[in-house]
């Protein structure tokens, strides 16, 4: 069985006080990376090798992505960073039958993306902090 992956079916959606914004203008070769900040368990080994695990209750994480510097989404993200407004974010992958998605509420922009200009289109990397990152790939 052959399947085809299409990044056009992956959407990063931000909901904030002014409405809903579909992020666009991703850099060529860009990825959207979703990651938790901590491991789910912490191992503790005793002097004789007995091991216990402590469950981590930190569900915070980040969503990192790179846009072309001429992406219209940079303006929306810059306004959110400047205003310190909390917002919701969701990444939905329409490529698979499970409709994998990730995101959360009460998110903030960690810092404005660096601004670089040169002879060609440059990139701006954005990091969204998600206090309770939900990951569903079922």
Image: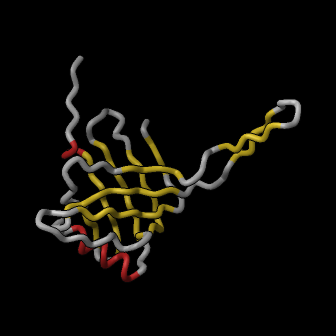
Residue 80: image location, x then y, percent: 35, 76
Residue 22: image location, x then y, percent: 24, 61
**For residue 70, what is the image quadrant?**
bottom left
Instruction: Please say if 79 is above or below 134.
Output: below
Viewer-proximal residue, 17 or 60? 60
Return the residue found at the far left. Answer: 119
Q: Which residue is drawn at 21% across and 20% down?
A: 2
Viewer-proximal residue, 38 or 89? 38
**For residue 122, what is the image quadrant?**
bottom left
Q: Which residue is drawn at 53% across and 62% down?
A: 131
- Give the quadrant of the N terminus: top left
Return the residue found at the far top. Answer: 1
Q: Residue at x 38, y 46 (%)?
A: 101
Res 22 seen here: no
Determine whether, in the image, residue 9 is placed left or right of residue 78.
Answer: left
Viewer-proximal residue, 53 or 69? 69
Res 12 seen here: yes
Return the residue found at the far bottom. Answer: 83
Determine whether, in the image, residue 104 is placed left or right of residue 60.
Answer: left
Residue 86: image location, x then y, percent: 43, 73
Determine whether, in the image, residue 74 is placed left or right of residue 45.
Answer: left
Q: Which residue is drawn at 41% across and 56% down?
A: 63
Instruction: Please say if 53 is above or below 104.
Output: above
- Give the quadrant of the C terminus: top left
* Color encoding of the figure: secondary structure
Determine whether, in the image, residue 10 is placed left or right of residue 37.
Answer: left
């Amino acid at each position: 069985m052959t399947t085809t992956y299409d990044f056009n079916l992956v959407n990063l959606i931000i909901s904030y006080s002014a409405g809903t914004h579909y992020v666009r203008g991703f850099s060529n070769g860009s990825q959207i990376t979703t990651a938790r900040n901590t491991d789910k368990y912490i191992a503790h080994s005793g002097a004789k090798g007995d091991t216990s695990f402590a469950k981590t209750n930190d569900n915070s994480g980040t969503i990192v992505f790179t846009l072309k510097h001429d992406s219209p989404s940079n303006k929306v993200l810059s306004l959110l960073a400047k205003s310190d407004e909390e917002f919701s974010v969701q990444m939905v992958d329409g490529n698979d039958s499970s409709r994998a998605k990730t995101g959360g509420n009460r998110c903030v922009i960690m810092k404005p993306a660096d601004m670089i200009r040169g002879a060609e289109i440059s990139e701006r990397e954005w990091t969204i902090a998600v206090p309770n990152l939900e990951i569903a790939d079922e």
